[in-house]
Every structure is written in C-alpha cells, then in structure tokens.
Image (cartoon, rainbow, N blue to C red):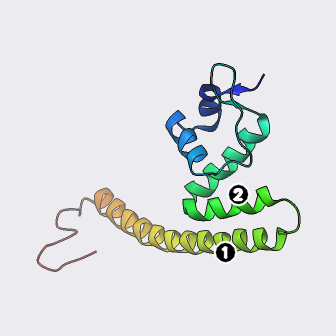
Amino acid sequence: MGIPIGQVAESTGLSVHALRFFEREGLFLREIPRSGGGRRLFEPADVDWLVLCNRLRASGMPIGVIKDFAALVRQGPGNEPQRLALLEEHERAVRARLAELTANLAVIHDKVETYRQHVRDGTAAGVWDPQGRIS
C-alpha cells in the first residue's frame, strides 16, 4: 500500500514541500513509486532515511553533501570507506561547532550569574555602564 506523503511529513517533521524538494534533489535512495492517482507512496525504510537526512541537515550538513552521501548509498556495497569519511568529516565539523557553542555558553552563563548576583544584591543599576564600567 505505502505511506502517503502527508503521513510521512507528520512522522518526520518535514513539510510536504520539503519532501518534494528532497525528491527533486535526488536525496532518496530509490525512486518513490506513485499510486494510480499519482500520489507518492513511501515505505518505512524511506521514512527512516528521511529522519537521518533531516538530522544531517539540522546538524549543518549541506544539501550537496547529503546528495553525495545518498548517491554513495544508492551505489550499494563497496564504497563504505567513502561514506565513513564523509560522515567522519561532518562529525568533526559538528564537534567543532559544539565546542564553539559551549565556549559561547560559558561566557553567557557568567554574564547571567553576574546579573543575577547584582539583581539579588540590589546593585544592578549601572551594571553595564555606557561610560565604561562593565561587570
């Protein structure tokens, strides 16, 4: 029977428009068959693949790299080292972004604690003074 596009959109968190975009861009591992009425019919494996693609996108992987990964998977066995290299590079990039975000969060947290202390002590007026006093 297949899973209709609306149900796939609901279960993946992707819009119907995004699913159509993925199809146009060649991001699926197979051609999605259609019903006699022309409606796309997905399989559970297609949904699993979409969930992975969505995670890759959400973590900053460019569509072009996802396309490359999909093409490698579609080619079948024998190119696992290339797939691994692609995923390892993305993992390194995500870890670097996490480290940067963690450093940024530490600075923000310190500022929150400074303001929290000043508000608690009643000394918040002028904490960030345009005349040069910075806490």
Please say if 41 is above or below 47. Answer: above
Depth order, front residue of 113/42: 42
For residue 89, which numbered disc appears in the image? 1
Residue at the spot 52% in from the left edge and 36% down from the top edge:
15
| Alpha-carbon span between mark 1 and mark 2 | 16 Å
| Residue with the most extreme top position | 37
Tag 1: residue type? Glu
Depth order, front residue of 134/93: 93
Residue 60 appears in the picture as rendered: no
Dot 1 falls on a residue whose secondary structure is: helix
Judged left or right of residue 105, residue 88 is right
Residue 68 appears in the picture as rendered: yes
Tag 2: residue type? Ala
Please say if 131 is above or below 35. Answer: below
Residue tagged 2: 70
The C terminus: image quadrant: bottom left
| Residue with the most extreme left position | 131
- Image quarter of residue 92: bottom right
The percent position of residue 80, horizontal first and vertical second, equals 83, 68
